[in-house]
Amino acid sequence: MENFNSKDMAMKAQKKILSNMANKSVVQMFIDDTSSEILDELYRVSKEYTGNRNEAQKVIKDLIKVVVKIAVLFRHNCFSEEELRVAQNFKKKLHQGAMTAISFHEVDFTFDKAVISDILTACRDMLLKLVSTHLTTKSHGRINHVFSHYSDPEFLTQLYNPNGPFKSNLHKICSGLNKLLEEGKL
């Protein structure tokens, strides 16, 4: 049995950023249980889709590192007014993406890979604009890696295949997204 866990991965990323302050309660400040469950399902789908455990771990690790770094920047009020407007637009687009993903899951024969791919690409562009002066080129590469992986039309087609192997994973991902939307976290 595999010991991969997104909370543990988030803790490793925070340790690097926050040095000796990193512990389980600090991890929970940045990534809640529902988000962690979604990340775990995304990992499982990525691992199965790519057939490469290391690549799946790298995508999730990159995602967690970016989320933690942006959360740290927000908590320390590092963003200008213009950047905060970009962040608001990003949040709206991410919210739209979550609602679209859920709708495509719940309503048969509505899935359109181009729509989700376009939303994710727009989110990537906004996120890169938001962090352009705050994060390193390496972090920008992580953002590109995560979004190019999850916005890949073939990946999305496999994920949303109603008879495919990811049906239960997609259900869990969408249930988690629904919960985050209901709680106003997304």
Image: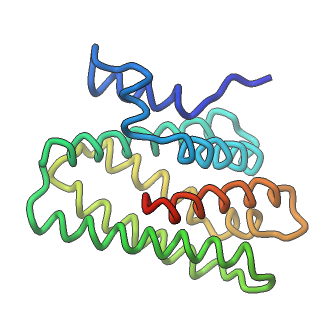
Color scheme of the displayed model: rainbow
The location of residue 182, given as percent across then percent down, is 52, 64
Q: Residue furthest toward the top?
A: 20
What residue is at 61 percent from the left and 30 percent from the top?
5
Give above or below for 181 relative to 172. below
Relative placement, left or right, of 37 versus 172 is: left
Quick one: 147 or 170, which is closer to the camera?
Answer: 170
Q: Quadrant of residue 129?
A: bottom left
- Quarter occupied by the N terminus: top right
- Quarter occupied by the C terminus: bottom left
The location of residue 181, given as percent across then percent down, is 51, 65
The location of residue 31, given as percent across then percent down, is 45, 41
Report the number of discs.
Answer: 0
Q: Residue furthest toward the left?
A: 80
The location of residue 114, given as percent across then percent down, is 60, 81
Q: Residue furthest toward the front?
A: 183
Q: Residue furthest toward the right?
A: 163
Relative placement, left or right, of 32 versus 88 is: right
What residue is at 32 percent from the left and 44 percent from the top?
139
What residue is at 73 percent from the left and 59 percent from the top?
170
Relative placement, left or right, of 72 versus 52 is: left
Give above or below for 76 relative to 107. above
Q: Quadrant of residue 166?
A: bottom right
Q: Quadrant of residue 93?
A: bottom left
Give above or below for 178 relative to 99. above
Quick one: 21 or 3, which is closer to the camera?
Answer: 21
